[in-house]
Amino acid sequence: MFTVSIDTIFVLVLFAALALFSTFWVISKVAEWRTHYTPESPHIFRCPICLHIFIAESGPSIVRCPRCQSLSEAKGARIH
Ligand SMILES: [Zn+2]
């Protein structure tokens, strides 16, 4: 049977504690990211032609209704 010195036990306990703390750190960071993360500002639009409500990115100034394919100005169609 092999013998384990007190130094080896100390190092093992130290690494186990380090692994435990880093695991908890990663979990807390992921939880923080999930609560604060918002996707790149999608907005809700209402088509002025068919009144269909849809979600689109706020980037383009003209949005296309996915139902009737009509184009409308994003500024006027945006409701949120
Ligand atoms: Zn429409």
Image (spheres, rainbow, N blue to C red):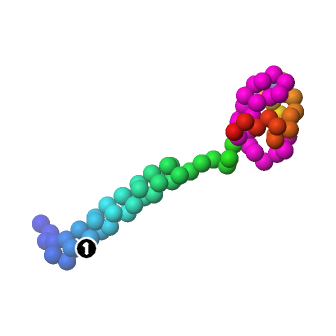
Query: Residue 25: horizontal and vertical position, in percent?
Result: 39, 61
Left or right side of 4 for 14: right
Kindly identify the amino acid type of the residue bearing the numbered disc 1.
Val
Which residue is drawn at the image coordinates 78% and 24% (left, top)?
Answer: 51
Quarter that holds the N terminus: bottom left
Span highlighted in magenta in the image: 43-62
Left or right side of 9 for 16: right
Q: Residues within 10 Å of mark 1 (few under 14, many from 20)?
A: few
Quarter that holds the C terminus: top right
Query: Residue 66: horizontal and vertical position, in percent?
Result: 78, 28
Mark 1 secondary-structure assignment: helix
Residue 57 in view: yes
Q: Name the residue under label 1.
A: 11
Foreground of the two, 8 or 1:
8
Foreground of the two, 70 or 5:
70
Foreground of the two, 58 or 29:
58
Which residue is drawn at the image coordinates 87% and 33% (left, top)?
Answer: 71
Left or right side of 1 for 72: right
Q: Is residue 49 magenta?
A: yes
